[in-house]
Structures are given as C-alpha cells and as structure tokens.
Image (cartoon, coloured by chain):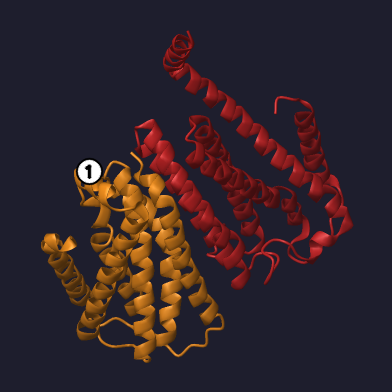
Amino acid sequence: MEWRQKHTLFGVLLYVGSTVFVIYMMNGQPVDKVWNALFWLTQLFVAVNAVAKSFLQESVSRFRYYYSIVKPQTFMLAKMIYSLVLQTFMTLVSLILFWIMLGDPITQNGLFACVALLGGVSLALVFTFISAIAARANQNTGMMAIIGFPLVTPVLMILGNLALKAIAPVYQPGWWTLAGVLALFDGLVVVLSVILFPFLWKE
Amino acid sequence: MRQSWWKIVCVALLAYTLIGGMLLPVPRLFILNETIRNLYFHVPMWFAMVILFAVSFWYAIKYLRSGKMEDDIYSVQFANVGILFSVLGMLTGMEWATYTWDGGPWTGDPKQLCAALCMLIYFAYLVLRAGIKDEEKRANISAVMNIFAFALMIPLIFVIPRMVSSLHPGGSGNPAFSKYDLDSDMRMVFYPAIIAWILLSVWITSLCIRLNLIKYKKDNSFRFELEEKIAAKSKA
C-alpha cells in the first residue's frame, strides 16, 4: 500500500545521497570518530524523513477505512514491519554511500553492519510510534521533532558507542550489556505501542 | 486528603529538616566537607519526583480504562509537580557539583545526562499537551505519552546509571547511596527529610488538582446541568 507513494521513497534516496555528498564537499574524508558521528546523524535524519512520514501522510478518511478492516494491533505491527524494512534498506544504502564517498575507517565490517542494522531497527520502531502519536496530534511534523528527539537521544548515544568498537580497536567493558539494553529498549517500544495504539486510535 | 494533620506533620518535618540539616553535626569528609548537607535537599527531591511520576502513571492507566476527565486532571497535575521537583533536584545537584566536582555546574556525567534526558521527555509531554486543542483527544494522547515516558524513565534513572561509572556519590552500584549515609547522625535528619519533601510535593499537587477540578466543573457546569435534567426526565 505504501508503493503508491513511490516519489517519497526516491525522494529519501536522493536525500541520503545529497547529504553524503554535502558532507564530502565540506569536510573531505573525516577521521574515524567524526565519521561515526556523521553516520549516525545521517541515520537520524533519514529516519525522520522516511519512517516518520508513515502515519503523517495518511488522510483521515483512509484511517477510518483501515480501522474498519483490521484490528489496531495488526495495523500497528504492519506499519512497524514496513518501516523496519524501509529503514534497513536506507541504512544499507547510506552505509554504501559512506564507504564510497567518505572513506572506510571500519576495521570489523561484519560487526559494524550488525550494529548499523540494529540501529536502523531501533530508529524505525521508535519513530513509527512517535509518528503515530504525532499524527493524532493535529498531523503536525513539528510536534514529532519535539517528542522524538529526547526519545532517540539515548538510542543514538548507545549506538555511537557500540559502533566505535567496530571502528577503533578500543577495549570496551560493557559492550554486550549496552547491546542488551538497546535490544530490550526495542522490545519495550514494540510491546508498549501494541498495547497503547488501540487507545490512540479511538475517535 | 482534606485532613490537616499530615500538613502539620509536613511543616514540622520541613522545619526540622531546615534547622537540623543546617546545624546538626555531619562527618567531615575529604572534598565534601559541609556540602554533604545537600543530601537532605537534593536526594529527597528525586524521591518525591519518582513517586509523583509513578502516581501520574497510575492515573494515566486509570484514565485510559475509565475515560473520566477527573483521572486525566489527577495524572497531569502529578506529572506537573513531578517536573517541578525534577527541576529543583537538578538545580540542587548542579550547585553541589559546581563546588565538589570542580568542573562547573555541567560536567556531562552519565547520571546527570540520564536525568536531563528524562526531564526532556517529560517536557515533551507538556508540549504535546499544550499542542492539542480538543479536550478528550488531548487526554487520550497525553495519557499514552505519559505511560511511554514513565516506561522510559525507569531505565534512564534506575538501570543505566548502575551500569556506567560516574562521579556521582554511590560510585558503581546504587546510584545515590554510599557508606557515608550510614552515619547515624545524618540518618536522623535524612529520613525525616525524605518524608517531609514527599509530603510537601503531595500537598502542592492536591492543591493544584482541586483548583483544576473546580475549573473543569465550572467550565462544564452547563453540560452537567443538562445531563442532570435528562436523567431526571428519564426517571419521570
């Protein structure tokens, strides 16, 4: 059902490409730590642009139509799965673009890819829920930024730290616990949104 | 809630906390010295905040189940006063940090960061509420957001601080307590201080709730009267 809006997909792809290009023009090839920070910032903005639109673009009447054919839990899960796939795809695209344009500081490719995927999943889940809230609150994009940024700041902090391991061979004691916290956080978001979404949907 | 005895207890304990907290002997510790007295003010603020947020969370669930506007008013006022106490806790903590951590009020300590993030999430809750005009919709969405915020506050305040090292007293392990709380002179003031600040926070909240309930009833008096008339007619 989302394929109807192909132009947004290509729009986001173009957005990723131009962001990476702008970074390249302004900065050349950055050092490892900056590379890491830039990568996650790009991910954040891609998530805001791609995933967060999922609820905001639907019109009210179409919501009513969905409401009449499926249970709210199913609808929420479907939205989450869709945004998961989308965000994973975007993460891979931007990862490849970063490799091409900004150099390759990564020492452990597999590990970084795993962290990037986990990051894509977390961002997608959080932003789907936030966009569900924001869509009910007067379809306002500004609202989404206000609610969203405090929520994703801890996620991004954890992700940045996780990814550093794949970049620089520093010893990090609590790496697995950090990864565990992030996974738990994802689980929490999924459970909460499935429980709470029916209440949001009531007219 | 309208009885006066607990308010008297609150005032008495607060007076005791202020006087005792400033004058009673405290152990002399390296660097800390007299700043240890901040324990009587800074720590109870967070206790009060956690309790207020928990009650607010409870009323948010209650609202979603019952749909009564009264529950929404309870939930919001508890969250409001909780935010006030978190600001106070942050300010007292920052002032203390200026003199003991030697790096100004903000040092980017993990515990400070987590507390700040938690506050930001609750600020977002307030902004969200302010942005919605329709009353019932606002109550619904903000209750959902409240539950979400509380679920995030638990890991931010209780879990992550236990996992990273920090300058904050308590070191690794429990985020707030450590050996020097065990001094028996300090306990004499510390426990009453906790009770006093919690009572004060509940007192403030109950006033806010009563004020807002009156406002709500006044704004909707027309509707209530109408409902009563309809009920009377249907009886007749």
- Which residue is disc 1 drawn over? A60
- Whether residue A2 sits left or right of residue B144 in the image: it is left
Q: Is residue B184 left or right of residue B10?
A: right
> On what subunit does the disc labeled 1 rest?
A
Q: Nearer the viewer, residue A93 or B114?
A: A93
Q: x, y (%) of residue A95?
A: 26, 80
How many numbered circles does the render carry?
Answer: 1
As drawn, the residue found furthest toward the front would be: B236
What color does chain B have in the rendering? red
Rendering coords of residue A25 (x, y %)? 18, 75
Give how far across and how far down residue B45 sits, in percent: 66, 47
Q: Tell me which residue sits at (35%, 38%) in the image.
A: B131
The quadrant in which residue B96 appears is bottom right
In front of the other: A129 or A100 = A129
For label 1, the SS is helix
Closest to the observer, B77 or B191:
B77
Q: Does residue B123 appear in the picture of this structure?
A: no
Identify which amino acid the numbered label 1 is placed on. Answer: Val
Quarter of the N terminus of chain B within the rendering: top right
Q: Position of residue B111 (x, y in %)?
A: 58, 63
Task: Give the residue furthest to the top.
Answer: B236
* Quadrant in the rendering for residue B173: bottom right
Q: Is residue A171 above or below residue A64?
A: below
Residue B196 shows up from this direction: yes
Q: Residue at x 17, y 67 (%)?
A: A15
Whether residue A17 sits left or right of residue B41 in the image: it is: left
How busy is the neighbourhood of tag 1: few (under 14 within 10 Å), some, or many (20 plus)?
few
The one of B113 and B76 positioned closer to us in this rendering: B76
Residue B166 in the figure: left or right of residue A104 = right
Q: Which chain is orange?
A: A
